[in-house]
Image (cartoon, rainbow, N blue to C red):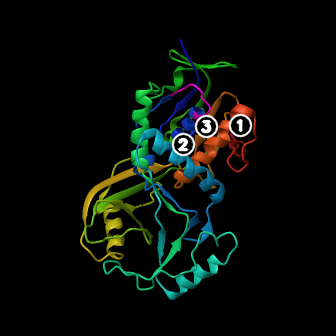
Amino acid sequence: MKEVEYIIVGNGLAGIAFCEQLRAAKKDFIVFDNKSQQSSSVAAGLYNPVILKRFTKVWNAKAQLTLAIPKYKVLEQLLDVKLDYQLPVYRRFMSVEEQNDWFTASDKPVLEEYLSTTLVKNTNDDIHADFGFGEVLHSGRIDTSQLVKSYRNYLLEVEKLEVNGFQYELLKIESEYIEYKDIRATYIVFAEGYGVSKNPFFNYLPLNGTKGEMLTIEAPDLKMEFIMKSSVFIVPLGHDLFWIGATYERQDKTHSITESAKEQLVDKLRQIIKCDFKIVKQVAGIRPTTKDRRPLVGAHPDHKNIFVLNGLGTRGVMISPYVAEQLFNHIETGEQLDPEIDIKRIKK
């Protein structure tokens, strides 16, 4: 019987963030992941402290960013890859009224450190932006595809990854430990993204799941070195490639790409840029979204050694280190979880 302190199920942003808490604390663990969930891998990976549709601050933005950015620097060193691309986010204005709304929002104390009060004029002939842009400060992109792939390889190298799917019915639960096949652990943490909807221990949680489809385009003439928010996000990936997304679909819960989503994204893109482009990839993922837009974190109501770390929604890059630290401190020291993320708020 192999003994570890933790079993983690899932190697997306949430699982990686929790593994990093364990690694820093020198806790022994093993991860189960069969690549069944791919929202972390296909996401744009933006960290942006402002909800640009409504000009409101992201929940707990400052605390999340303060914690997250150094964590990604540590991961860059561990994995020997570039992950953090500090790029401004430009909000494209469609009218003078939108400009005025921006400047009104930038005067609010909660937003003034994130919204520049200087109007950015459009100097790119291949972009439709007669009214210019507003610049979001303290923003950027984490290469989540590179992160997930590299961390998976790291776990394989240190022999901490099982690539088989997790079979819930084989989990044996005792008061002081849990057993799974030939592994005995003190705790298990389920960080499965939308996959938790099939988890018999936590399928009561109100995880909606929102499908998103995204394109990667090649546009050599675009020459855009900032992230643009308009009717879609346009994110530079380097080498004339750009991430375009994303759609929001609440009924379809498959990872299949659709022609309708492609047409929707292309139609919106052609209203923003003037240059030619070629689609080189289309992908889909299911975001683990919640109705109250807060993560789902905490212990199972009946089994105090079984935990969930989920519901990161569209802002997993920012939120994952914060909620992983919260859960780790809760398990190890009894520190109370932030009530807004604690699954105690959900009635089973």
* Res 110 quadrant in image: bottom right
Vertical placement of residue 220 versus 93, above or below: above
**Is residue 163 visible in the rendered structure shown here?**
no
Distance from label 2 to label 3 (Cα)? 10 Å
Q: Residue furthest top?
A: 1
Q: Is residue 232 left or right of residue 56?
A: left
Residue at 39%, 47% (x, y): give it: 145
What residue is disc 2 on? 14
Task: Name the quadrant of the C terminus.
Answer: top right
Q: Is residue 201 left or right of residue 265?
A: right
What residue is disc 3 on? 308
What residue is disc 1 on? 330
Distance from label 2 to label 1 (Cα)? 16 Å
Q: Does the magenta run of residues contain 324? A: no
Q: Are marks 2 and 1 in contact (CB under 8 Å)?
A: no
Q: Amino acid at mark 3?
A: Val
Secondary structure of residue under mark 2: helix
Judged by depth in the image, the label closer to the viewer, 1 or 3, is 1
Q: Check disc 1: other Cα within 10 Å, few if <14, some if 14-19, many if 20+.
A: some
Tell me which label, 1 or 3, sits earlier in the chain.
3
Secondary structure of residue under mark 3: strand
Tell me which label, 2 or 1, sits earlier in the chain.
2
Q: Amino acid at mark 1?
A: His
> Between 314 and 134, which is closer to the camera in this rendering?
134
First to last magenta residue range: 24-30
Judged by depth in the image, the label closer to the viewer, 2 or 3, is 2
Residue 326: percent from left, percent from top: 67, 42
Tell me which label, 2 or 3, sits earlier in the chain.
2
